[in-house]
Image (cartoon, rainbow, N blue to C red):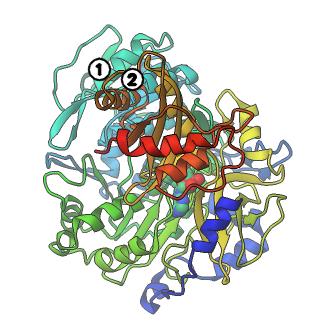
Amino acid sequence: MSEIQKTLDNLSQENRTFMPSPEFAANANVNAGIYEEAEADRLGFWAKQARELDWDNDFTDVLDWSDAPFAKWFVGGKLNVAYNCVDRHVHAGHGDQVALQFEGEPGDQLNITYRELMERVCKAANALTELGISAGDRIAIYMPMIPEAVVAMLACARVGAVHSVVFAGFSAEALRSRIHDAQAKLVITADGQNRRGSVMSLKPAVDEAVAASPSVNHVLVVQRCGNEITWGPKDVWWHEFVESQSSEHTPVAFDSEHPLFILYTSGTTGKPKGILHTTGGYLTQVAYTHRVVFDLKPDTDVYWCTADIGWVTGHSYIVYGPLANRVTQVIYEGTPDTPGKDRWWDIIERHGVTILYTAPTAIRTFMKWGDELPASHDLSSLRVLGSVGEPINPEAWMWYRSVIGGNKCPIVDTWWQTETGGIMISPLPGVTATKPGSAMRGLPGIGVAVVDDAGTPLGNGKGGFLVLTEPWPAMLRGIWGDNQRFVDTYWSKWPQYYFAGDGAKLDNDGALWLLGRVDDVMNVSGHRISTTEVESALVSHPSVAEAAVVGAADETTGQAIVAFVILRGGMEGQDGTSLVTELRNHVSNEIGAIAKPKKIMIVPELPKTRSGKILRRLLQDVAEHREIGDSMTLADPSVINLISAGLESSSTDD
Ligand code: WT7
């Protein structure tokens, strides 16, 4: 608590407030009455949101919480997610509306209408069936940001198969362990992807992972780049096998609690958690939140969420929520600096993007690149700006508002998690007066509180732990294969609340400020990485005896990974610089480039308590160049001086 308390004290009271404009408010999808409506009858409110979807069988109960914390939402209801995201729009006469405006990094463009999307999903669903996939089977998806990734996810949903999307930046080993944990029968991938002007091959990592995965029967490969790849007996080309299927497929309705997907996320141990989401509640909440938080107008908006489908934002706010709401959206394959650092602004101008949803780390990067780049493009089509993934600092918020939004677009800072499935805390555009840097308050239908150690809810002006006080439709239903871990991680600190792992503060007006993680989880560029996972990767290298990893404050990425490493006996003589490079690459190979430490410090000792626990807080002080605080609990106080001395001599930064 004391660390949080310090942050709280430092957090100056933010006095700027931005009222919604009268014009925006007059046309907004909702008004302030929605909070009262949800308050008056929470479950009735959710039932109403659920009935925006097309159910084959109506549900009999809104919520069954008798087996808490294992929830059942919309009990007895049956629906097909892919039908709700695609077919029903075609049947309602919107078959010619563009669903996806795809732009590849090299500049290739492809518009896909809802009718074409339906045909593609049907063909892929038929292909899955022919490959022996049936409802409940798991499918790993390891793909670039191309339309086939969306089609693959929807095809899984259509046949009731459970997808596990693995971010294509993860290593072969990370892919293998996720395939193994879920016992996936099929992997869907591509030959390569375009990154920074060149082709990055994806297939070799899949080949390596599949060679060690006896559960996998087939690998379905999209030809994206035409790069040379090795072809094995399990491999099937998408353009041959899927394209030759019938474009008709009758969807089957699945139970509201039928599993929809697993998505792995880092926890406080070395083993990622397979977060499990199901059908009816998930689709209800992502569609509802997408409609109210972004004020979506399906006939006129052009929406762009810059996330990757490898993360939950891509699942909930590229695929399921937006498509359920009949969005027209941009999908972009590549990096923001190719061919120039104005690529995003160029995309917004050419596609006429009206709603932009991105991450603070991207906003801070663009701030560094300079105002001239966005200023050289017409961004006047924009009307709502969203932020997600980490706290947005007031300075970045103000820049986003003025330089990107021309001081006219409401900003929605949306707090949620892989586990929550959908947005939980956010302003509502046209309704909420916003403060730069605050996610403001829980959405209608969502129960949020800030509590102290004892679990007592705190009042305004106080800081503590963020909890969710009521079950919500898109909540995780468990951790794949490890329900005990689900209970222990989220429901044991205070059994009546979901513990999110974040610190938060309510200011004097009751606005909510997120203060970052309170556990051993780092947030690097909006991506969650466990300190333990990186430590395990480091100690798997033959030169390393022990490692401690911390997240240090970083101007652009929020946090940066800093590792303290003790070498094995006999290794001390090695060239420090080349060893550090080798270790950084080793972590990249073990987990993926996103987990590559920014700095590795080779140290003679680590600060530990008498019971042998590593004092991460102290290391964080060192990594952030802060003065070392109280070290009374240290077994050997001189250790910290040794580490500080080593800091300048063996750090690497690139
Ligand atoms: C963690 C969840 C939600 C999709 C992307 C990340 C942090 C997320 C915010 C925000 C402050 C935020 C929290 C949370 N976080 N959004 N608007 N303000 N912090 O999903 O990988 O599951 O990470 O991201 O620390 O616990 P995730």
Residue 579 % position (x, y): 33, 26
Q: In this view, which residue lies farthest toward the bottom?
A: 22
Instruction: Examine the rendered structure and indicate whether residue 28 appears above or below residue 245.
Output: below
Q: Residue at x 65, y 62 (%)?
A: 4
For the residues bearing labels 1 and 2, Cβ distance under 8 angstroms? yes
Is there any visible trace of residue 414 in the rendered image?
A: yes
Q: Is residue 475 left or right of residue 602?
A: right
Query: Could you say which is closer to the camera, residue 220 or residue 591?
Result: 591
Residue type, label 1: Pro
Is there any visible trace of residue 320 in the rendered image?
A: no
The image's mark for residue 314 is none
Numbered marks: total: 2
Residue 398 % position (x, y): 39, 78
Q: Which residue is mark 1?
A: 204
Residue 639 % position (x, y): 57, 39
Q: In this view, which residue lies farthest toward the top?
A: 233
Q: Which residue is mark 2?
A: 172
Query: Could you say which is closer to the camera, residue 431 or residue 252?
Result: 431
Residue type, label 2: Ala
